[in-house]
Amino acid sequence: MILVTNDDGVRSPGLRALAASLAELGQVVVVAPDRNRSAVGHALTLDHPLRAEEVKPQVYAVDGTPTDCVNLGIHGLIRQRPRLVVSGINRGSNVGDDITYSGTVCAALEASLMGLPAFAISLDSQRFDPSDLETAALFARQLAERILAQGLPQETFLNVNVPAGGCRGVMLTHQGKRRYGETVICKQDPRGKNYYWIGGSEIGFENSPGSDCNALADGKISITPLKTNMTHEAAFTELHPWPWNDLMVKT
Ligand code: MN
């Protein structure tokens, strides 16, 4: 059984295309948020109960986050370990600094924490052009087949991004760096109170050969292997000589 989720919500055409394509490989169960929960990251709902509605056979809509869906799906609804968890197809790419904001990527991260093979897949377009969706869905199926046959390296999950308008190849990439405009828009509501909107005006990405951003810019499918443990091993060398014990206030 393959578990499919996303962060755009259970009605997203991206989710439908992904689930339909993966169904060629065997049983697919969809457990997805009942509405758009993009950019909720790895949030887990702890302060209220969750409801799941089986909107179609084997398709559950949950009033929670993508991470809730993976958790609830595996431990509450399906009650078996899926052979693979796939999250997407997201509307818009998830590259560079997007990764930790992304509910799509963090659903795969959650599955990886549970020791399951997983990948997230996003389309680099806000429009779901049918031919782009088909490209992404077919790639997802081929990749899933490969992972089911061969597994993934230990503690690894994949972040897949598919360019729009045709593909010129596939590249293993590292996480790049996106640059956002540092804008917060401030306006007044009809009652004269200020409200704010975090900008998100994207001003490009740092040019870094071999990065996810560069691969998309070159029209290639980007595959970034990620791990859940964020320890920065290389930083130990520089931080080790710091006088850590002197920083501790003696009481
Ligand atoms: Mn999304």
Image (cartoon, helix red, strand yellow):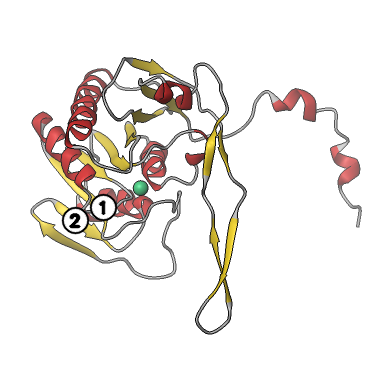
Which residue is identified by label 1? 32
| Extreme-bottom residue of the structure | 191
- Where, quadrant-wise, is the C terminus in this rendering? bottom right
What residue is shown at x 35% (from left), y 29% (from top)? 160
Horizontal and vertical percent position of residue 185: 57, 61
Secondary structure of the residue carrying tag 2 is strand
Q: How many marks?
A: 2
Left or right, 106 with respect to 54, comes to right
Q: Are marks 2 and 1 in contact (CB under 8 Å)?
A: yes
In the image, is residue 25 above or below residue 191?
A: above
Q: Which mark sits nearer the N-terminus, 2 or 1?
A: 1
Q: Quadrant of residue 215?
A: top left
Left or right, 165 with respect to 201, comes to left
| Between 54 and 115, the one nearer to me in the picture | 54
Identify the mark at residue 60; answer none if there is no mark: 2
Q: Residues within 10 Å of mark 2 (few under 14, many from 20)?
A: many
What residue is shown at x 34% (from left), y 60% (from top)? 64
Q: Residues within 10 Å of mark 1 (few under 14, many from 20)?
A: many
| Between 129 and 70, the one nearer to me in the picture | 129
Horizontal and vertical percent position of residue 168: 31, 15
What residue is shown at x 59% (from left), y 45% (from top)? 181
The three-letter code of the residue at mark 2 reads Tyr
The three-letter code of the residue at mark 1 reads Ala
Horizontal and vertical percent position of residue 26: 10, 33
Identify the mark at residue 143; answer none if there is no mark: none
In the image, is residue 119 above or below residue 174?
A: below
